[in-house]
Image: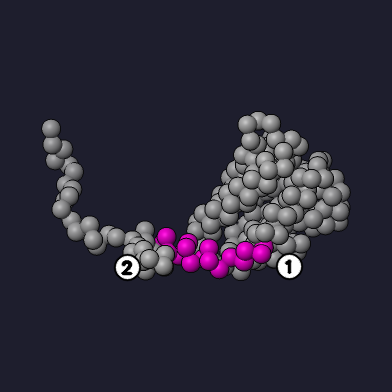
Amino acid sequence: MTNKNIDINWNRKIEENKMFAITAGTEIEIKDKVGWLGHATSIYNSLQEVEESSIKYLIECIWSIYINEKQFFICGNGGSACNSNHFAQDLTKGTIENGISKPRIKAISLCNDIGFITATSNDDSYDNIFKHQLVSYANEGDGLFVISGSGNSDNLINAVEWAHLNGMETYGILGYDGGILKDKLSSYIHINLNHMEKCEGIMSIILHYIMCQLKERINNKS
């Protein structure tokens, strides 16, 4: 039975929709720069600009926290809150091989406790939702990792400032120009792109890479 409400021309020129032409040297020749291709090209180009040394440094810092059995707190807002939860899960569960890897990375997302977050927002200020969790749980020598597109969120800035005053190292992954946080963090990964959704997608790629590298190292050690 034909659906008359759908008019699809299956004979459109597929060639017009081609994204890439891969040469023998693996160089990607961009055929077009609109729509999906423009989005993918922007992400590809931005990934090439990320300093690999900053990623390697974060891996070494998380490894040190793991070896010393310290805690690694993660936080962000909106989509970055979701990336925080995802990254914490990847570090605690995703790095385990056959359920026997030990010790485990003690990664904790500060975006999970909806009761604490809403109580603090209601009774105090949304600007303190992460800082007050650190007051409750963090110890000297622990690490704080912030995920931010703009680098200007007050609740992240407050958490970072508290962390520094209490013997914690601070790390981050930032978009746009890095905002205020770039001058407050011990170190950070920078995605120099003024597009929030693309930044969040690139962050996810980088964080998955970090998890994969740590998983390999942890399970080679076990």
Residue at point 73%, 55% (across, down): 60
Residue 170 vs residue 75: left or right? right
Residue count near mark 1 (Cα–Cα under 10 Å), binned few <14, some 14–19, many ≥20 = few
Which circle, 2 or 1, is nearer the viewer? 2
Q: Which residue is mark 2?
A: 31
Which stretch did the figure color magenta? 39-54
- The part of the image, by quadrant, that contains residue 30 is bottom left
From the top left corner, tell me how far across and down residue 27 is, in percent.
Answer: 41, 68
For disc 2, the neighbor class at 10 Å (few under 14, some 14 to 19, many from 20) is few
Residue 123: in magenta span: no
List the single residue furthest toward the top. 99
Task: Judge whether residue 47 is colored magenta.
Answer: yes
Please identify the quarter of the rendering in which residue 93 is found.
Answer: top right
- Main SS, magenta residues: helix
Q: Residue 196 at what x, y percent from top left? A: 53, 59
* Residue 154 seen from this side: no
**Amino acid type for the residue under numbered disc 1:** Asp
- Quarter that holds the N terminus: top left
SS under mark 2: loop
